[in-house]
Image (cartoon, helix red, strand yellow):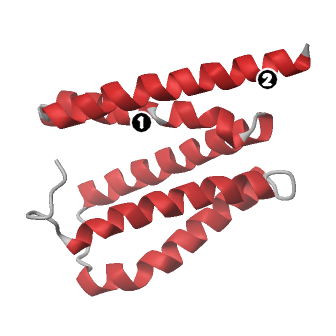
Amino acid sequence: RPSTAAFDPRWLSVLGSALLFAGLDVLNKVFIGKESFWAMIFYTAAITAILAAVPAALVWTAPTAMQLGLLIVLGGGANLLLFCLLKAFSLVDVSALAPYRYLELLLSILVGYIFFAEIPATSTIAGALAIVPATAFITWKEQQSMNSKEK
């Protein structure tokens, strides 16, 4: 529910994160043929650690054993996700994967509901109902266009 009345400049970090993730996708596609999967996973983790070190140090508190375990699971899952993404980039063009990235929106809504009893706002559902079909339609039209050029 965007409005200027409730704007918080810290929300720009979300926009910055989206731009960085998009840039990471492009960089991953560029380097996928030049570097091994493991090297790319290492570089991603190393750069993330370097970029996060100073902000984390400013508010750091030692994690509990439970939190440390959850962080390890999160790190393993994130690296598995990156491995699968890199594998996908090695097989198809980045633009062909874009529609599947919108599945993150639907999965986020589902996980929020199941694990946190979060009811999605009407605006979230409306946004998903606009974004997902539009992306599916664009992908379908591009596929038709590519198929007609091949004939």
From this viewpoint, is residue 37 visible? Answer: yes
Residue indicated by mark 1 = 104
Q: Amino acid at mark 2?
A: Met
Q: Earlier in the sequence, mark 1 or mark 2?
A: 1
Q: 1 left or right of 85?
A: left
Q: Nearer the viewer, residue 96 or 50?
A: 96
Q: Mark 1 Cα within 10 Å, few/some/many (few <14, many 20+)?
A: few
Q: Amino acid at mark 1?
A: Glu
The residue at 66%/39% (across/down) is: 95
Q: Helix, strand, or loop for circle 2?
A: helix
The residue at 41%/50% (across/down) is: 74
Q: Quadrant of residue 9?
A: bottom left
Q: Assign the C terminus to one quadrant of the image.
A: top right
Q: Nearer the viewer, residue 4 or 75?
A: 4
Q: 72 left or right of 145?
A: left
Distance, label 1 to label 2, CA atoms, is 26 Å
Q: Quadrant of residue 90?
A: top right
Q: Which mark is residue 146?
A: 2
The residue at 26%/65% (across/down) is: 11
